[in-house]
Image: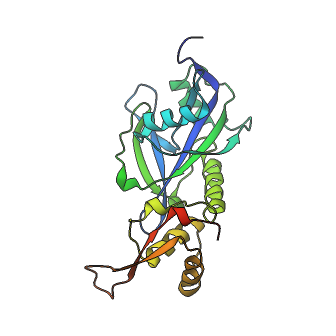
Amino acid sequence: MPQHAINPNVSVDCVIFSFNNQELEVLLIERSAGNTDKVDEIKALPGNLIYEDETLDCAAERVLTELTGLENIFLEQVYTFGDPDRISKKHDQDWLRSIRAHPEARVITVAYTSLINKERFNLTPSSFARNAVWVKVKDVPQLGFDHNDILEKALDHLKQKIYIKPLGYELLPDRFTLAQLQKLYEAILDDKFDKRNFRRKILRTYFIVPLNEKQQGVAHKPAGLYRFDKSLFHQM
């Protein structure tokens, strides 16, 4: 088998979330049309076919780096999408013909997801990704292929995991207020919480540790600061 031979039937797609202190965002790419300078008007999740000589996990890491420049990101496998019609849209077929040797091949994709602090990474898109952009989840347009379905599945996965895994705390400063923490949970769960009830519930978990410090340089009454202790994390 030639090294790096492409498997035309298996791909990986990456759903990368971040938090802008108010709302949840997702990383999308603007596709170039083949070897031209034209940018495809349809955005998509970062994804591509796998190599025959790599694992799915390695493929997800490689594809994400190639298309966005993001490296050393923990990726979690979410779901497998294999509908026979998932690449049946004419616009997507036309685009595939411009970049793939087997544009008509049925493709099964394995979706991965991650939640990162975008301020800690620089986007350097390449390959057929002419640009990589952060888009508010609520503002995501119609994407290529079945990527809206993949995004929804990743969101559901995130919502199910938020209370049983320490997701999202890397999105906060090392020292944060309970108001910042509440905004994070509300963004992920797409819900609004009563401040008093949220604080009572979150402080019962014990993994949120109060510090003997308050905010500095704020116009309003400074709030107390907390930190996240991963060693104390347990299910709420």
* In the displayed structure image, the side of residue 91 where residue 118 appears, left or right: left
* Furthest residue toward right: 84
* Furthest residue toward top: 1
Going 53% across and 31% down the picture, which residue do you hit?
95
Going 27% across and 79% down the picture, which residue do you hit?
216
* In the displayed structure image, the side of residue 104 where residue 186 appears, left or right: left
* x, y percent for residue 73: 47, 44
Q: Nearer the viewer, residue 155 or 178?
A: 178
* x, y percent for residue 28: 48, 47
* In the displayed structure image, the side of residue 80 where residue 176 appears, left or right: left
Q: Nearer the viewer, residue 212 or 162?
A: 212
* x, y percent for residue 20: 42, 63
* Furthest residue toward front: 231
Find residue 88 and report its image quarter.
Answer: top right
* Image quarter hosting the C terminus: bottom right
Going 58% across and 35% down the picture, which residue do you hit?
57
Total label count? 0
Find residue 106 and report its image quarter.
Answer: top right
Whether residue 44 is situated above or below residue 153 in the rendered picture:
above
* x, y percent for residue 149: 65, 50
Is residue 19 in sight in this rendering?
no
* Image quarter hosting the N terminus: top right
Is residue 69 in sight in this rendering?
yes
Whether residue 44 is situated above or below residue 100 in the rendered picture:
below
* Furthest residue toward left: 217
Q: What sort of colour scheme is used for the picture?
A: rainbow
Whether residue 129 is situated above or below residue 202 in the rendered picture:
above
